[in-house]
Amino acid sequence: MTHTIPTISKRRKGSWDVPKDPQVWESENRDNSESTSNFDATFNNGDVIYVGDDECRGQWNRPLDFLMSMIAYVVGLGNVWRFPYLCYRNGGGSFLVAYIIFLVFSAVPIFFLEVSLGQYLQRGAMEIWQMCPLFKGVGIGNIVLCFMCVWYFCIIVSWAVFYFFSSMASTFPWETCNNWWNTESCVSISLHDKVNTSSGISLNVSRLLQTSVEQFWERRVLRDTGDILDFGGVQWELLIINVVVWIIIYFCIWKGITHAQKFVYVCSLFPYVIITVLLTRGLTLPGAMTGISYYLTPNVTKLYEVSVWIDAGSQVCYSYGIGFGTLIALGSRNKFHHNCYRDAICMSFVNVGTSLLAGFAIFSVLGFMAESVGKDVSQIVKPGVGLAFLAYPEIASHLPLKQLWACLFFLMIIILGFDSQVCMVEGLFLALEDRFPLVLRKYKKISVGIMCLIFCVISFPMTTYTGANWLTLIDGYGPSGYALSFLVAFEIIGIAWGFGAERMREAMHQMLGFWPCRFWLILWKFTAPIFCTALFILCCVFYTPLKYPDGSRLMEDESEITEVKRQEKFVYTSVLTLKREEITFDEIGTRPCRSVDEFQKVRKLGEGTYGIVYEGLDRRSGNTVALKQVRLDLKKEGLSISVIREIHSLMNIEHENIVRLFDVAVGKKPHKIFLVMEYCNQDLASLLDNMQSPFTESQVKCLLLQLFEGLNHLHSNFLIHRDIKVSNLLLNDKGILKIADFGLARLFGDPPTEMTPRVVTLWYRPPELLFGSKYQSKSIDMWAAGCIMGELLLHKPLLPGKDEIDQIRRIIYFLGTPTERIWPGLSKLTLMSKVQLYSQPYNNIKTVFPEALPECIALMNRLFAYDPERRVSAAECLESDYFKCSPLPCDPSMMPSLTGLTKKSRKRVAED
């Protein structure tokens, strides 16, 4: 049965004529002087648009060119980093159900429509809406969204290029903390993993304690200022990379994308090679199936959560590239009778398959890392950009041939981002070219160059130190979420109801030579509009303002968020992430700290730089505790990093000779924070000041033995105290020594970490720090322990220097002048180029301690070794003959006690 298309005069206003087949049109118009390659249709407003093969705009040389270009555009970054994360977060297989439902009933019909419209009308996103002028704003919206996406997409490519070249180093720059951009709050990933696996403790690093990967991302790549309005400066590497990327884009499209098909073929297929290689390697790693199980394990109850459907719908629209006008532009380069129906169906399978394949590749490696560091996969996965620039660099550090896998991964990110960007720029220019053909088509090379230059210039703010914040702002309020769903909803309504789904089906019959199934009419007229509208409504109802790491909301009045509220949230976050039991980030802020009202203040013990210490009574248990009220500077940094370090260290290190932190209490006002600590009724400094007679040899050995036990436990957990001194050593009523005050404590490891040398109280500071070394290890604690040993034996400070120069002079008198022979590397230290040491060839330890036992002198010589590498460890001290010879260490219960502090000793405690 032959279907007859009704024809109405194209000159009658308000009518529409479906163009006849080109051959029929040609035979009926042989006398027409116009080219037979075009034929026309009249739309509702009476305008005539010529449809058919438009040779002036450039067409694909082969049908496969169009398919490869669509793969290059559609298969992008969203498939590799966004889809796997969303699939995991929303219940694995359950998310796939929601995703496929949106795919079948929304994305594929719209995808097919956009490509068909472009092919049928041979026009870009703006001009096709002459078919329904009422919805002409949709075409403008397509261009705006495409403009916003093109605006920032090259910055993501620039980040990937930066990581690509950084991955070529023999040691990844994000592996260690001894780089110029690292701060004292840095924890290297290798050491972080060692601590987790060796102690069985899960270290949820707080806001101020960051891994080296996070600091590389924030302080090296981005140099983030933390304030969206504080541009800080220009990240010159990113600026140069961004300029080079835009130059390459220009040369790819200056003659049109149809002239760059070799480039398109490479960009389309090469990512699949890399994904396959990564998947093959990932499946051979131990723990791979654990990651894949996390990826695909269904959680049916998740389908009842609105967030799953919002994420699924947004991901479908984003990954298929609908609503940006690029598909219309790519389709407009097809020949009129090209089978776009076949390509649209094919692309549906390719896109879904790519997302699933990338998920398998990524999660197989995530499973390996989770097993290697003893974590759950949920602690490895990071959302969005974090999966590419935070999780994978950390993962690559644990892989054999890590440079190869890191380079391949970031090369894939570069190609996926680059080819999508080329297609979007082409689509944007083509839409503008159709609008202004006389200028843009005639001077195409210049026009494309000007457009690329404009985008390069306006992307400049995103290469500054706050660039990532602006990118997040543009992406969050631009081409994603409710903005995209709003535009797509009106686009499908405009085509299916404004233009007419039946008319569109008739037009497709003219192009394809067959009638598309009537099921498409149901999809276009009902399911796709309903799904898109529902997605937009859900996005609006469950809208959440953008947030940055400090918790402040963009686009809202900052005055509503008081400093006290910020401090309250910050304290809860810092404390709860450091609890001994494992707490997920979703629980942060939901578990209250204890109230200070549960404790009774008995008396004030002392006051120092970071707080006031009280003797207190725990009303719940009846035990005596120490309450340390933390000072908060609400105008500046808030909770001091020294306090954060102390909480972090004490929550994760338990030993008889280390003071315990029981809990954290909060006062009626959120900025009143109290550390609930183990109570000790005296410190060693006060005891030394008030004793009538010196310690006996047995008592000295008892104290030193406990000190070395505590230090050995710290060092075995890769923690150095960095401020060992007598006032930081406490004694309880049973004579047990406790190491306290962990405000300067840091993790250490191999390779050594670069830290500030201005730590350790001057009298206990080792020579390597005095000479300017920035690399610190457990040897600095052992030098301080030697100074304490001498102080206990002499009953006075051993090396009480007035300043750093005087301290060096005293050390040289005590041990002799250091030389390169006994201290390799001495000449390379900073201070050696500025001072000349006086000659003193004698070791005076025996002179200072004339009555000391030979075993005591031997231990001191090892504690006071100039070379940090040769300095004795705490474990070796415990095996020293000094503790085995007579007199033996006394029992701790035999230690003297101090019932009250004198005015002098109280002052010393306060100053410390």
Image (spheres, rainbow, N blue to C red):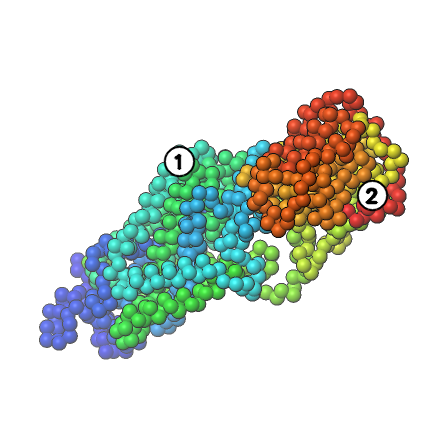
Above or below residue 122? Residue 280 is: above
Above or below residue 222? Residue 796 is: above
Nearer to me, 572 or 602: 602
What residue is shown at x 68% (from left), y 39% (from top)? 840
Horizontal side, residue 273 vs residue 765: left or right: left
Q: Residues within 10 Å of mark 1 (few under 14, many from 20)?
A: many
Query: What residue is disc 1 on?
Result: 283
What residue is shown at x 31% (from left), y 51% (from top)? 268
- Helix, strand or loop status at disc 1: helix
What residue is shown at x 44% (from left), y 49% (from top)? 166
Residue 255: percent from left, percent from top: 26, 65
Residue 314: percent from left, percent from top: 44, 55
Q: Residues within 10 Å of mark 2 (few under 14, many from 20)?
A: many
What residue is shown at x 41% (from left), y 46% (from top)? 168
Query: What residue is disc 2 on?
Result: 615
Q: CA distance from mark 1 to mark 2?
A: 58 Å
Q: Amino acid at mark 2?
A: Glu
User: Within the image, what quadrant is residue 491 found in?
Assistant: bottom left
